[in-house]
Image (cartoon, rainbow, N blue to C red):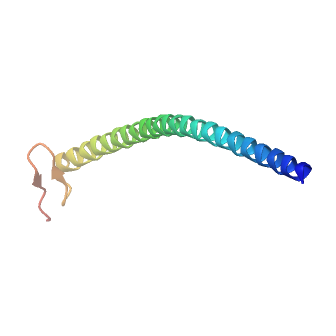
Amino acid sequence: MRTRIITLAAVAALSMGAVACTEAETEQAEADAAVAADQAGDVAAQAGEVIEAGAMKAARAVEDGAGAAADKLEENQAEAAAEGRPGAVNPATDQRVPAN
C-alpha cells in the first residue's frame, strides 16, 4: 500500500510538472504570437505604402498621358478651326465653326 501511495504521489508530481511546463510554454507561445502580430502589422503597413506609392505613380502617368492627349487634341482643333473646317471648335474662343 505504501508503494502505491508513493507511486501516486510521483505520478501527481510529474503531472503537475507537466502542467507547469505546458503553462510556461503557453505563455511563451502567446508572447511569440504577440511579437509576430506586431511584425505582421508592420509588414502590412509597409506593403500598403508600397502599393500606395505604385498607385500614385500610375495615377501621375495617366494624368500626364491625358494632359498630353488633351494638348494634342487642342492643337488639332485650333488648326481645324483656323482652316475653317465645319464642326471644329476654336479652343481660344470656344466657338464652333458653322457648317456650310
Is residue 1 found left or right of 57 in the rendered image?
Answer: right
Is residue 25 found left or right of 74 in the rendered image?
Answer: right
- Classify residue 25 by image quadrant: top right
Q: How many marks?
A: 0
Of residues 68 and 29, the one nearer the viewer is 29
Q: Is residue 11 above or below residue 43?
A: below
- Classify residue 79 by image quadrant: top left
Measuring from the top left, give residue 75's x and y in whole percent: 26, 42
Residue 82: in sight, yes or no? yes
Is residue 65 found left or right of 28 in the rendered image?
Answer: left
Of residues 63 and 71, the one nearer the viewer is 63
What residue do we see at 58% from left, 41% from top?
Answer: 30
Image quadrant in which the N terminus is located:
bottom right
Residue 84: in sight, yes or no? no
Residue ranking furthest to the front: 1
Q: Is residue 84 above or below residue 18?
A: below
Measuring from the top left, give residue 83's x and y in whole percent: 20, 48
- Classify residue 35 by image quadrant: top right
What residue do we see at 50% from left, 38% from top?
Answer: 47
Q: Is residue 84 above or below residue 48?
A: below
Of residues 62 and 24, the one nearer the viewer is 24
What residue do we see at 33% from left, 44% from top?
Answer: 66
What residue do we see at 61% from left, 36% from top?
Answer: 32
Measuring from the top left, give residue 20's x and y in whole percent: 68, 41
Image quadrant in which the C terminus is located:
bottom left
Residue ranking furthest to the bottom: 100
